[in-house]
Amino acid sequence: MSRSPVSPEFAVPAALIETHSKDASALPWLNSLPELAAGYLDRWTLTLAGESLYGAASLVLPVVREDGTGAMLKLQPLNDENVGEAVGLRTWNGDGVVRVLEDDPSTATLLLERLHPQSLSSLPDHVEATRILAELLARLTAVQAPPELRRLADVAGAMVEEAPRMIPLLGDPAERSLVRRCVARVVELLPESGDRLLHWDLHYDNVLAADREPWLVIDPKPLAGDPCFELFAAMNNRWEDLVATGDLPQAIRRRFELMVGVLGLDRERAVGWTLGRILQNVLWDLEDGEHRIEPVQVAIAEALMDPTT
């Protein structure tokens, strides 16, 4: 079978350029992307089989392997978030997740089984979509994390250390108080941060339709920790469905309780680690020059901390 090389005119998608252009360490990857893709097509004996797909941080090329099976070649700049992606996926070994067919740890390049371009976001019933996501998450977090992965204990510990310096950058006293409450909850939970294999970014667009199972998980940012740390991504997405209920705080709590119930989690720990995720996002935003908390995150925090609202 002849292989289709990446042409010299291969265009790097604008979304990738926008994401990585401010990161000097990623510019060499952007500039070498056409040659990098061509090299892996040759190395793994692949034929291009359609137009490229891409997200904010990676390029995905539909390909056909030498034996005729379809696959997806994922190219991304190596960083702290994706360095353990192949390790995590191979540890789950296809149980609820996309399979790894080939990988190169030196560049975080992956050859993955072919899935369908339909995510859980397309499911009309957001409650059913949340149930499916939670059931997948329960399978993933039943697995112990390999020792080489990053640990929630270290990530959360760094957040607690950084918070006192960053909180004064918030302009609203009420928001500063909210973040201090988040810090206090994380401090309580730090001594028992868990050892399960976490996805760290499991929202509805990271679950795709498949042939091997109805739905499979993609794009983990593997972390060793407490499964309670996993809930925020699902709370923060399909937000318009929660707003459309007419009672946003109650809708937030119902989605949260559904996930807690399916995963069999302790509610108070789940609230605490969800506040930890909000703390993490606030710190990231402050580092980027923001001075207010995103309203969606305030709404989630307030609904979970005050069940009477």
Image (cartoon, rainbow, N blue to C red):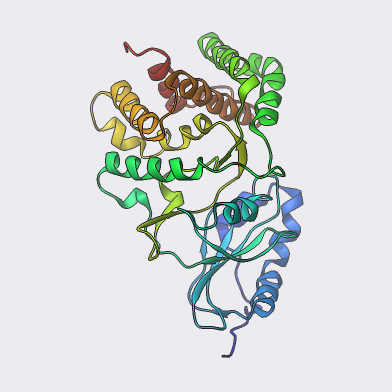
Residue 134 position, x and y percent, is 39, 40
> In this view of the protein, which residue sits in the foreground, 264 or 36?
264
The single residue placed furthest to the bottom in the displayed view is 1
The quadrant of the rendering that contains the C terminus is: top left
> In this view of the protein, which residue sits in the foreground, 210 or 168?
210
The quadrant of the rendering that contains the N terminus is: bottom right
Query: Looking at the picture, does residue 234 appear above or below residue 38?
Result: above
Residue at 43% over, 49% down: 205
Residue at 31% over, 10% down: 308
Classify residue 303 as left or right of residue 44.
left
Determine which quarter of the picture holds residue 193: top right
Residue at 46% over, 50% down: 206
Give the mark count: 0
Residue 146 position, x and y percent, is 66, 45
Determine which quarter of the picture holds residue 132: top left
Query: Looking at the picture, does residue 37 appear above or below residue 19?
Result: below
Residue 167 position, x and y percent, is 64, 16
Classify residue 61 as left or right of residue 255.
right
Residue at 49% over, 72% down: 51
Residue 148 position, x and y percent, is 72, 44
Query: Looking at the picture, does residue 233 appear above or below residue 67?
Result: above
Determine which quarter of the picture holds residue 249: top left
